[in-house]
Image (cartoon, rainbow, N blue to C red):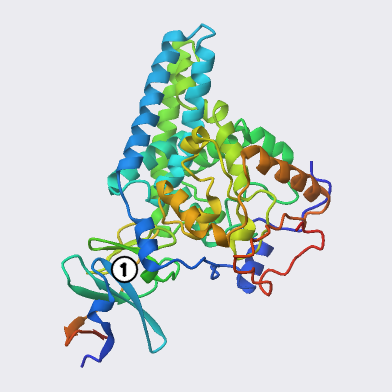
Amino acid sequence: MANWIEACAADNIEEEDVIRFDHGGRVFAIYRSPEDEYFATEGLCTHEHICLADGLVMDEIIECPKHNGRFNYKTGEAKGAPACINLKTYPVKVEDGAVFVAV
Amino acid sequence: MSTVASKRDYSLIGRDAQAAVENGLAAAEWYHTDIERKQMKELMKRTDGPAMRDTVIWLGSLVVLGASGIALWGTWWAVPVFLAYGVLYGSAGDSRWHECGHGTAFKTRWMNDVVYQIASFMMMRNPVTWRWSHARHHTDTIIVGRDPEIAVMRPPDLARVILNFFGILDVWHAVIDMGRNAAGIVSAEEKTFIPEMEQAKVVRVARIWVAIYATTIALSIWLGSILPLMLIGLPRFYGAWHAVMTGLLQHGGLADNVTDHRLNSRTVHMNPISRFIYWNMNYHVEHHMFPMVPYHALPRLHALIKHDLPAPNTSIIDGYREMIPAFLRQLRYEDYYLKRELPPTAKPYRDELHADPAPQAAE
């Protein structure tokens, strides 16, 4: 059974942006797409563990702020070197203006 | 020209590589100037316009100068034409390789990739190997045993530095690497930073390049003229000087084994022609601190964070005035380095992490 955790208020994230969410010693990245949908992935780049929340969201891509590793944050797919390993993704829901992540 | 054996082991599989990992210098957390997220997003924002303009000027000039060089071949007029062609090939190619390797020059991905492939070929840098090598350079900037792109090791080998103004040793090593990779061999050092799944690409690119260079050499022999090589290959020698001149300033004479780019990188104000050739990499502290900020936004980034950075060198000559004496002193005292003084508005260096390795460090 999913363990839903409240991550942030929905309006804490700007459109086409990302924020960091720490829970249980783990780092997550919570995204708001240009279409006003919310997504969550693990929060550290699979290349060298840089915090993705400092990166740039472009359409459905999150780009690592250090080495240009790029991922589709909706699917977690790594989109090319130096990112070669996919990100884990997590289910997200929005209720009463809050974003919940199933960790 | 070294006078003493180096205490530093720059091998990526040697003693200092292991020490860097044990000391927490590998993949460490680095100092960053605080910038509001909104401002950072604005700075990182991608656009095609500036790089398209610059690329049309760059490649268009190469075509015009190359055609002029062919037309004027055999006359003295060809000399200045090829000097300009060479700088656009062997020096501007370096900065295009660099920026497009970061994927920040253009918004459109394929444009970055095309220019990256062209510039990598010009610079004789395998685009796969050097993408990974440069990622490591950004992770472990001037960390001995970890950074594969330390241009001047200590004590400085000044003969090597001078020869590289004409690409001599760089090209020699590039040709050796290309041949070795084309033969299907990826070295033990390359394997430390290139993942296994990428290594086949290294070999494939090397084989394509060997074929292109072999064709160019064959054409030169068939024509009985070095003209084809003046257009492809040789500009990597005779046009390299500007890239080396500016590139040495990036980290030359500054600290190693620190985790603050303000200590190991140098920002230098430059003339607009050099900045075009160099694609604004004169803002080098800023680039290392925030590598995803495109080259065209670096002047804005500099203006935003200069209160937290050492004062930039005022010119290329000013940079060399401090760097050359530092190199000369490092011949005798390899631990010597130039310590960058921070303005009163800056956050101080974390001295607990950057204890001076040498009492003679310059203030």
Of B165 and B336, the residue lying toward us: B336
- Most extreme residue toward the top is B75
Q: Position of residue B321 (x, y in %)?
A: 72, 41
Q: Tell me where residue B213 sits by quadrant.
A: top left
Asked which quadrant contains residue A76, the reply is: bottom left
| Image quadrant containing the C terminus of chain A | bottom left
Q: Is residue B202 left or right of residue A6?
A: right
Q: Residue at x 54, y 28 (%)?
A: B239
In the rendered image, residue A38, in percent from the top left (x then y), is placed at: 21, 75
Residue A52 in the image: above or below residue B181: below
The residue that disc 1 covers is: A86
Seen from the viewer's position, the closer of residues B85 and B48 is: B48
Q: Is residue B325 left or right of residue B95?
A: right
Q: Is residue B101 above or below residue B8?
A: above
Amino acid carrying label 1: it is: Asn
Chain under disc 1: A
